[in-house]
Amino acid sequence: MVIKIDFQSEEALYMQLRNQIILGIATSVIQEGDSLPSVRQLAGDIGINMHTVNKAYSLLRQEGFLTIDRRKGAVIALDVDKMEAINEIKKNLRVILAKAHCKNISADEVHELVDEIFSEYEPL
């Protein structure tokens, strides 16, 4: 998986890294059981601080996308707690949909966008 960091973006580097790993999982570029590079290796490869990579990995672990194994390092391990994930998505969507409503974007347009984006991901 190729990680591309936009150093000009206002989005925090650790969030860019986190998001790219999640997108990698969703598109099956990274799969359950795959090991991610060590914090040191990934930081060196993409030219960011090790603490930034560590923060992204910690967040992914908290969100149920990976586990940290002392021997294997960071390993993709998807959390099976679907209800918790649904509640988190609902919370995030509430704000996104409020923005859409304020910009006069219809429910049909939102549904089209969701279908378009969701079709990019293979079933897990």
Image (cartoon, rainbow, N blue to C red):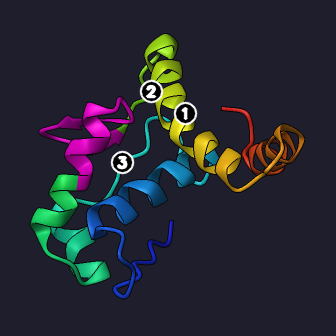
Closer to viewer: mark 3 or mark 1: 1
> Which residue is at the front of the view, 9 or 52?
9
Disc 1 marks which residue?
94
Q: Nearer the viewer, residue 78 or 14?
A: 14
Q: Which numbered mark, 3 or 2, is in the foreground of this view?
A: 2
Three-letter amino acid code of the residue under disc 3: Ser
Neighbours of disc 3 within 10 Å: few (<14), some (14-19), many (20+): some
CA–CA distance in space, label 3 to label 2: 26 Å
Mark 3 vs 2: CB contact within 8 A: no
Residue 73's place in the image compared with 4, above or below, is above
Residue at x 73% of width, y 33% of height: 123
| Cβ atoms at labels 2 and 1 below 8 Å apart | no
| Residue in front for this viewpoint, 28 or 95 | 95
Kindly identify which residue carries mark 2: 88
> Alpha-carbon neighbours of circle 1 within 10 Å: few (<14), some, or many (≥20)?
few
Q: Which mark is residue 29?
A: none
Q: CA distance from mark 3 to mark 1?
A: 33 Å
User: Can you give x and y, in whole percent of width and height, for residue 11 in the image?
Assistant: 36, 69
Residue interval drawn in magenta: 56-75
Q: Which residue is mark 3?
A: 35
Amino acid identity at mark 1: Arg
| Mark 2, secondary structure of its residue | helix
Quadrant the C terminus occupies: top right
Q: Label 3's element?
A: loop
Mark 3 or mark 1: which comes first in sequence? 3
Identified at 37% across, 55% down, the residue is 18
Indicate whether residue 66 is drawn in magenta.
yes
Q: Secondary structure at mark 1?
A: helix
